[in-house]
Amino acid sequence: MDDLKMQKQTLKKAYKKTKRKHITPWKILAIICAVVMIVSIPLSILLQKFDNTMAARFGGSFWKLQNEDANAQYYTSDFNSAEEMVNYGLALTQQVEAEGAALLMNNNNALPLAADAKVSTFSSSSVNLVYGGTGSGNIDASTADTLRTALEKVGVTVNPTLWDFYTVGAGKDYARSKSGTVAKSSEVTAEVPWDVYTDEVKDSVAQYGDAAIVTLSRVGGEGADLSYGEVNYLALDENEKAMLQNVAEMKKNGTVKKTILLINSANALQVDFLKNNEYDIDAALWIGDVGISGINAVAEILTGKVNPSGSLVDTYCYDNFSAPAMWNFTPTTYEGYVEGGDVSAKAKSYMIYQEGIYVGYKYYETRYEDFVTGNGNAGDYAYGDIVAYPFGYGMSYTDFDISDMNVNYNAADDTYTVTVKVTNTGDMAGKKTVQVYVQSPNYFGVLEDMDAIVSAAHGAGAKVIMGVNPISLGLLKTPGEYGVDIAVGEGQPLGMPLSFGGPYLGFMTCKKAMMRKLPGRIVGQTTDAQGNRCFVLTLQAREQHIRREKASSNICSNEALCAMTASVYLAAMGPRGLRQVAETCASHAHYLAGELAKLGFSLRSGEKPFFHEFCTDCPMDPALLCAKLEERGILGGLPVDGGILWCCTELNTKADMDQLIAVIGEVLGK
């Protein structure tokens, strides 16, 4: 009996051992599969979202072209090699900095520096420049020149002791952290306290005292708002103030001859310290984020190899809180909000956009104009006490005088001559932009002689911007065929309903050589229904159109629907359809002009060609005639200088035009 029991136990142990032997590999495999699944699911989501980025980094592609034509050329590069493309990008970045940096002050011609100057570069930021911001502005600047190497390339000697103090000495412990792709919280200032500077470092300045170059850097970009309120990230911190104060003492004692300030920031720095120039700064240069090679252009500007010609794209103030937008920049939690309830945490608060469109220069300039003209509710507004450097401000090492602006029309050969005199009154070569804007068809519908205008403008070295009706291009020569540099226009005719004035879309294009110089945003000036001046964002190359309930930073209207409508319209019409629409518009306009002429409405443009708009004289008061037409349910023309501007489109039928003529005949008693 005992033997049988022992035999059963032995068999049971053998069974369990065999079972473990066979099951263990499957357990291990199951665990591995679970781990792989946990990793692969989010990884596959990331790969789908950033497939092009991964392909660019590791090579290959995540797509396959169906029905590929081996002989087709899907994309023709502008460059023969990757090296050529990179070199072009470096040169372009340097050119943008050279033409975009703005000289804000230059007391006693402190700049340019002598080519063999010996300088001391102050601040932790001087060795840790902001090359790009966060988000899409983030770049790898590991191969870029530093401020020191850029200055040395143009012949300037940089204080090595002070530089080493910031890079490998005690100052390195206060370096700003490198910006990531997307900021998670506000950046903070990072300057070395003055008591950390050793006597050896301070004494070294005397041998490199031709100039003290102080760099103030601020990071900007996507991901998080900057600190405001108790901490003002865009103002000087206490360590920066102490540094500037001690540099000023060095200048007072003769250790340094001049102080040069570099503002390395895409955000508008608060420059209250320049109001009374308490730190005795001689020159200030805004350089923005310098990009991969822009610091080389900065060095050339500092030494006079390049004459600064840029202008500010922001308003620089003595107090950044002087605008209503800053006081409204505080989220307010909705009453009744319950954490964990139906409303998500991201949607629990709101901001009051009481300032409307009046942000930045639109606020400062509009309020100043209202103060001067006595309009609105400007109050006692001291513009000069608030605005340090206005939008569009920028100095040069030379001076320009612009005079004798004339536009002359020669009826004999139907040509315009535009002249302006730009005189460099200084003793250094510099740049000043001159442009000619022409619209064809023009405001009165007349087709301009674009060949003559473009030839005259280019002959004088000016760029040509042309405003066009996109429908007219189905019939007329395109801006590119005329040789125009930039073309702009209103996209409403491209299948867009009138919709009580909007929303619409505009378009902007340029020659290939200027393609990479287009701005990211343009703010246009217009008037509202009451005739008040107002502003609108007329161009945006990239923006965050976020669903309201998901928005964590900004909420804005989405004009992409209008762009899509125009794209569908153009695709549906095609070249032949667009030409047919253009011919219909022109045919209707010329028919109506002929019928109106029989009633005494003579063309003001004489024999000049027109597309679908034309201006005529009017046998009676134009405003009264339009009012009579409106009473009959007809929206007539636009009264203009005693005449009427008429317009016909493909939507106007012959019956519509005949009815208009009949009603006008009745009003005139004919």
Image (tube, rainbow, N blue to C red):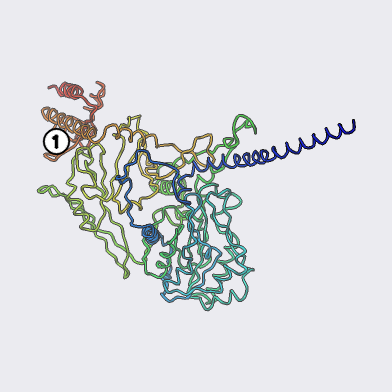
Across and down, in percent, residue 505 comes to 35, 38
Across and down, in percent, residue 31 comes to 66, 40
Task: Note whether 299 is above or below 329 in the view shown.
Answer: below
Across and down, in percent, residue 7 comes to 84, 34
Residue furthest bottom in the image: 207
Task: Note whether 76 is above or below 573 in the view shown.
Answer: below
Task: Note whether 599 is above or below 457 in the view shown.
Answer: above
Horizontal arrangement in the rendering, residue 13 relative to residue 473 (left or right)? right
Q: Nearer the viewer, residue 150 or 78?
A: 78
Residue furthest right in the image: 2
Residue 394 showing in the rendered view: no
Q: Which residue is mark 1?
A: 603
Q: How many marks?
A: 1
Residue 201 showing in the rendered view: yes
Mark 1 surroundings within 10 Å by alpha-carbon count, few (fewer than 14), some (14 through 19), many (20 or more) = many
The N terminus: image quadrant: top right
Horizontal arrangement in the rendering, residue 500 relative to residue 616 (left or right)? right
The C terminus: image quadrant: top left
Residue drawn at (49%, 42%) of the image? 49
Q: Nearer the viewer, residue 247 or 513?
A: 513
Residue type highlighted by circle 1: Leu
Across and down, in percent, residue 396 comes to 37, 64
Quadrant for residue 613, please give it: top left
Horizontal arrangement in the rendering, residue 390 relative to residue 129 (left or right)? left
Q: Nearer the viewer, residue 665 or 518?
A: 518
In what element is the residue under mark 1?
Answer: loop
Residue drawn at (62%, 64%) of the image? 173
Quadrant for residue 594, please give it: top left
